[in-house]
Image: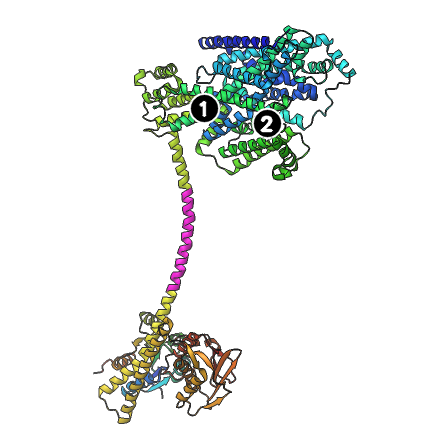
């Protein structure tokens, strides 16, 4: 009878065997490059790490529950290896050239060596893989418990230890084992020949074990036909579902992504690959392996359903069937097979993830917070190993915690698919990285982040439904009761399989953002360089040139860096080889750009592309122009370009400002010319009386014969012209003072009617011989203004009406009214009126009607009058009057 | 009988002074006070010369000059421009339009008489 103690002891012994295998495998691989460990067979078998306990146990359970659906998980990788091996070849070629160490490194390197992207991918991978690790822990735990529960003595020392305790023990053991296995040294290419050897061995073990169980089942069941016939007779139909539904398509798609993007698959397929041609073999051998693995899944499931008591866990059929038939040896083999598939996955996955964590999170932190390589005397290698060990513990802890929280969910396969969905978020970016030149860092980052958010919400969170009432409520009602945000029915997409739903939304958002953001953003120079290296990897056919331009970084500096990361021996070997190749003494080695480039790639193999680049930049750029600086310069050039575009914009603004200035200038010129015009007018107005005065003075001074009457007349003309001159100057001064607002007075209540009467009185002499018609007068009316100024306006208007009136019977009509709060005075005459063309000009300075015969006025009167009335908040206009001549109207507001 | 000088000037006092000094110098004078009248009088009275103010009502002195020069009949009539705007621009325009002399206000009487005499061709041989 098998007991738990016995199988645990066997498991530990098996692990011990693996360790020995790995140790010698490592030594052998190092000493002999042509060892069988470098063969395509081992390579293919190591890829088979894809088949985990999910396959060994879960596929049987899956087949028992959902029929042929389990096959999709193997169909996807088959498609990739058979149909898309050009994609894998491209991936391998690039990764070798660029010393890519992980999927995070790949995307980081492609998208401008962005460490931020690498960190994002690493974090997502660590979180996303946790359910997958939990799956393995659960499978191993269940298998041990299955053995323990098979007999009354089976429990052994497991007595009183529940599944959590058991899982914890397994997780701790696995962590220790992985640390011993995978973190003994840091390799430039992150290749772990020993581990790969052990994994290949495990692949053989698990395949043989499953085949043995399968053959046993077929043998016991009396052949395939009889197994299915018996099941049919019992009414067991395993393939009742709709075969090709959304879930099928989803798992198929997810498995395609997983075989490329799963950290451990990337590790074995791409990083551990030592020869591109191995892919040719793997392209048929790996699908064949999976076919063999799946061959007996369905018979085992059906036979289990037929023979095992109702309610037994179908996931464990591969183990419980031999036990039920008393085949302890086969059961132990099956257990070891399942254990193999679990350990190989955990070991490789944690190694791959720990490399990502140490290279993309720990290393950049060291580079940032230490002053670089020099401060750490013991070397980076040691630190990296510590970081990796810590990461392995972290990763297994996360797996354990996920197991702890979701231990009540029964089936294995759905847990694995949660991880697949998370990891699938990298796939669009990987494809874009390899084939689409315009894919940008921003796009990849946004796309992956968005996909991850959807994954957390739609897939990760719902897996806690059974343990958290909060999550259950959230699933039923949505956050804050918003039903269209329910994690499994986003935006009203109800009724879809939860997995298909999560995959649909996360990948749709992912792909959409990747495309759109790539189209709207422009990649940086480094991104463009990396993009062309990736996309044109087969076109170029040569190793990309060093990223550093020639400079004066000494070999010593570089060696110092290389020694810290690669170790003394490897660094020395590298430098000696370079010295040999360039034919100089190692001490005299002048590092060429090519060598620095090679060194960067070597370092990248250990610490990731981004970190290696930063590290070498620190050394090389000390006295040299690094690519980074060149990029910076390029960026600056870019900035200059955008700056000049800015300038262009600015100069457009300047142009418009200049235009405004020009306009203002034109206005000023206009004003200036108005001023010139004014001065010229003044000049004219002044010169005219001056001319008369001068001329007549000369006539008088000539002393010629002039009679007394004529002399008297000339003197009188001189006198009049002098008065005119004085009046003119007074008016000019008055007007200009009015215009400048200097001649201000306080508007106070004045009787407008009184002012009008006074004006009439003043003009009495002028009005002699003129008929004055009083056209109705207002009563005493108070307006705001200045009595003298208002009187001045009236005098001006009355005298104009008389002066320019050439009628034989001059008539003047004065009327004033108060209407609607306005006091209006009309002063009309029967003179020639104002010609239409002059009406606008009549209030301008120096404007005299053409018909004016009396030239004594300077043409300033109306301009002054209008200024005065305006000051009183009133208006002075030329209106259609009662008489044929002109009619001027003064309008002022009546005071209340 | 034909007159010697036609004066086109709208300022009455200036016209009076011109009339006085030119008559005293011995010429026969006729006067108008706007541009239209000036053109009309030139054709009708056929003066030996024209004393023309620039700032005239109805038709500016420059316009009158242009019309005179445009008509074959009067193209060669000597014209003395009088203006208060004694600016370079006015002088240039006057010259371009074919003025024969140019006097700015306020003028010295002797200058006007001298200019008129020169344009009438009476200065040669005069003591």
Q: Which residues are magenta?
A: A642-668
Q: Nearer the viewer, residue A274 or A803?
A: A274
Is residue B76 something one can see in this rendering?
no
The secondary element bearing badge 2 is classed as helix
Most extreme residue toward the right is A233
Q: Nearer the viewer, residue A620 or A705?
A: A620
Residue A650 located within the stretch drawn in magenta = yes
Mark identifier at residue A507:
none
Residue at point 69%, 27% (across, down): A245
Mark 1 and mark 2: span between their CA atoms?
A: 24 Å
The quadrant holding residue A331 is top right
Residue at point 62%, 34% (across, down): A474
Disc on the earlier residue, 1 or 2 = 1
Indicate whether A181 appears above or below A593.
above
Residue A184, image x and y in percent?
Answer: 45, 14
Residue at point 56%, 17% (across, down): A345
Q: In this figure, which residue is indicated by the disc labeled 1? A: A359
Most extreme residue toward the front is A160
Q: In this figure, which residue is indicated by the disc labeled 2? A: A421
From the viewer's perspective, tell me whether residue A322 is left or right of residue A669. right
Q: Classify the position of the N terminus of chain A by image quarter.
A: top right
Residue B91, image x and y in percent?
Answer: 32, 72
Contact (Cβ within 8 Å) of mark 1 with mark 2:
no
From the viewer's perspective, tell me whether residue A416 is left or right of residue B58. right
């Amino acid at each position: 009878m098998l007991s738990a103690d016995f199988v645990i002891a066997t498991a530990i012994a098996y692990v011990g065997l693996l360790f020995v295998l790995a140790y010698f495998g490592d030594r052998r691989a190092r000493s002999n490059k042509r060892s069988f460990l470098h063969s395509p067979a081992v390579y293919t078998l190591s890829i088979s790490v894809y088949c985990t306990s999910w396959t060994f146990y879960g596929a049987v359970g899956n087949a028992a529950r959902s029929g042929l659906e389990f096959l999709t998980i193997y169909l996807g990788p088959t498609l990739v290896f058979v149909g898309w091996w050009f994609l894998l070849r491209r991936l391998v070629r690039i990764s070798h050239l660029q010393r890519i160490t992980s999927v995070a490194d790949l995307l980081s390197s492609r998208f401008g060596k962005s460490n931020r992207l690498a960190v994002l991918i690493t974090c997502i991978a660590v979180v996303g893989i946790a359910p997958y690790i939990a799956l393995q822990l659960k499978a191993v735990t269940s298998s041990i418990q299955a053995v323990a529960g098979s007999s009354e003595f089976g429990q052994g020392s497991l007595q009183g230890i529940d599944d959590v305790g058991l899982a914890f023990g397994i997780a701790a053991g696995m962590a220790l084992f992985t640390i011993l296995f995978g973190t003994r040294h840091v390799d430039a290419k992150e290749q772990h020949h020993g581990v790969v050897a052990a994994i290949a061995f495990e692949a053989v073990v698990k395949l043989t074990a499953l085949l043995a169980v399968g053959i046993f089942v077929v043998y016991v069941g009396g052949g395939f036909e009889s197994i299915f016939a018996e099941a049919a007779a019992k009414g067991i139909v395993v393939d009742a579902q709709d075969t090709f539904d959304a879930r099928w398509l989803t798992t198929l798609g997810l498995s395609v992504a997983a075989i490329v993007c799963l950290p451990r698959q990337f590790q074995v397929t791409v990083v551990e690959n030592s020869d591109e041609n191995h892919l040719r073999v793997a392209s048929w051998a790996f699908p064949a392996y999976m076919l063999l693995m799946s061959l007996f899944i369905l018979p085992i499931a059906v036979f289990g359903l037929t023979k095992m008591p109702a309610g037994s866990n179908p996931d464990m059929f591969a183990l419980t069937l031999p036990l039920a038939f008393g085949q302890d040896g086969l059961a132990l083999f099956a257990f070891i097979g399942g254990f193999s598939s679990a350990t190989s996955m955990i070991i490789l996955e944690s190694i791959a993830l720990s490399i990502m964590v140490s290279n993309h999170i720990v290393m950049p932190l060291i580079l940032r917070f230490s002053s670089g390589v020099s401060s750490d005397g013991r070397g980076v290698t040691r630190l990296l190993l510590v970081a990796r060990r810590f990461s392995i513990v972290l990763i297994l802890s996360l797996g354990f915690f996920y197991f702890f929280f979701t231990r009540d969910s029964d089936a294995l396969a759905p847990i694995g698919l949660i991880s697949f969905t998370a990891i699938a978020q990298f796939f669009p970016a990987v494809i874009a990285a390899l084939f689409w030149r315009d894919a940008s860092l921003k796009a990849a980052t946004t796309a992956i982040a968005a996909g991850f958010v959807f994954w957390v919400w739609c897939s990760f969170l719902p897996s806690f439904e059974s343990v958290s009432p909060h999550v259950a409520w959230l699933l039923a009602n949505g956050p804050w009761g918003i039903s269209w945000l329910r994690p499994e029915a986003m935006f009203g997409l109800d009724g879809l399989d939860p997995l298909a739903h999560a995959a649909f939304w996360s990948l749709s958002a992912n792909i959409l953002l990747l495309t759109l953001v790539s189209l709207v953003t422009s990649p940086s120079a480094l991104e463009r360089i990396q993009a062309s290296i990736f996309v044109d990897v087969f076109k170029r056919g040569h190793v990309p040139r060093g990223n550093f331009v020639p400079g004066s970084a000494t070999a010593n500096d570089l060696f110092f860096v290389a020694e810290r990361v690669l170790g003394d021996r490897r660094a020395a070997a590298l430098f000696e080889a370079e010295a040999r190749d360039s034919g100089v003494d190692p001490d005299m080695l002048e590092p060429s750009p090519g060598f620095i480039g090679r060194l960067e790639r070597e370092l990248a193999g250990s610490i990731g592309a981004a970190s290696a680049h930063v590290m070498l930049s620190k050394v090389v750029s000390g006295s040299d122009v690094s690519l980074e600086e060149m990029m910076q310069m390029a960026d600056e050039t870019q900035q200059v370009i955008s700056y000049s575009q800015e300038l262009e914009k600015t100069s457009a603004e300047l142009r418009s400002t200049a235009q405004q200035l020009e306009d203002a200038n034109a206005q000023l010129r206009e004003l200036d010319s108005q001023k010139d015009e004014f001065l010229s007018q003044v000049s004219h107005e002044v010169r005219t009386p001056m001319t008369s005065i001068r001329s007549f003075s000369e006539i008088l001074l000539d002393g010629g014969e002039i009679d007394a009457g004529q002399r008297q007349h000339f003197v009188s003309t001189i006198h009049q012209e002098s008065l005119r001159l004085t009046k003119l100057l007074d008016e000019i001064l008055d007007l200009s003072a009015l215009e400048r607002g200097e001649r201000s007075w306080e508007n106070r209540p004045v009787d407008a009617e009184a002012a009008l009467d006074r004006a009439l009185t003043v003009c009495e002499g002028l009005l002699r011989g003129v008929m004055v018609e009083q056209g109705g007068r207002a009563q005493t009316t108070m307006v705001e203004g200045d009595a003298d100024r208002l009187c001045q306006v009236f005098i001006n208007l009355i005298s104009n009406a008389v002066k320019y009136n050439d009628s034989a019977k001059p008539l003047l009509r004065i009327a004033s009214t108060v209407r609607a709060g306005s006091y209006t005075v009309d002063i009309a005459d029967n003179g020639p009126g104002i010609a239409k063309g002059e009406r606008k000009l009549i209030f301008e300075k120096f404007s005299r009607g053409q018909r004016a015969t009396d030239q004594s006025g300077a043409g300033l009167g109306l301009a002054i009058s209008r200024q005065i009335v305006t000051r009183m908040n009133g208006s002075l206009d030329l209106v259609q009057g009662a008489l044929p001549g002109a009619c001027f109207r003064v309008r002022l507001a009546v005071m209340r | 009988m034909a007159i010697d000088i036609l004066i086109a000037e709208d300022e009455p006092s200036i016209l009076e002074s011109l009339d006085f000094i030119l008559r005293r110098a011995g010429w026969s004078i006729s006067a108008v006070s706007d541009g239209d009248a000036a053109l009309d009088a030139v054709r009708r009275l056929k003066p030996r010369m024209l004393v023309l103010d620039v700032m005239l009502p109805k038709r500016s002195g420059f316009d009158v000059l242009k019309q005179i020069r445009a008509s074959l009949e009067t193209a060669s009539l000597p014209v003395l421009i009088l203006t208060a705007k004694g600016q370079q621009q006015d002088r240039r325009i006057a010259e371009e339009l074919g003025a024969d002399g140019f006097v700015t206000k306020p003028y010295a009487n002797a200058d006007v008489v001298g200019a008129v005499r020169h344009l009438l061709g009476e200065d040669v041989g005069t003591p």
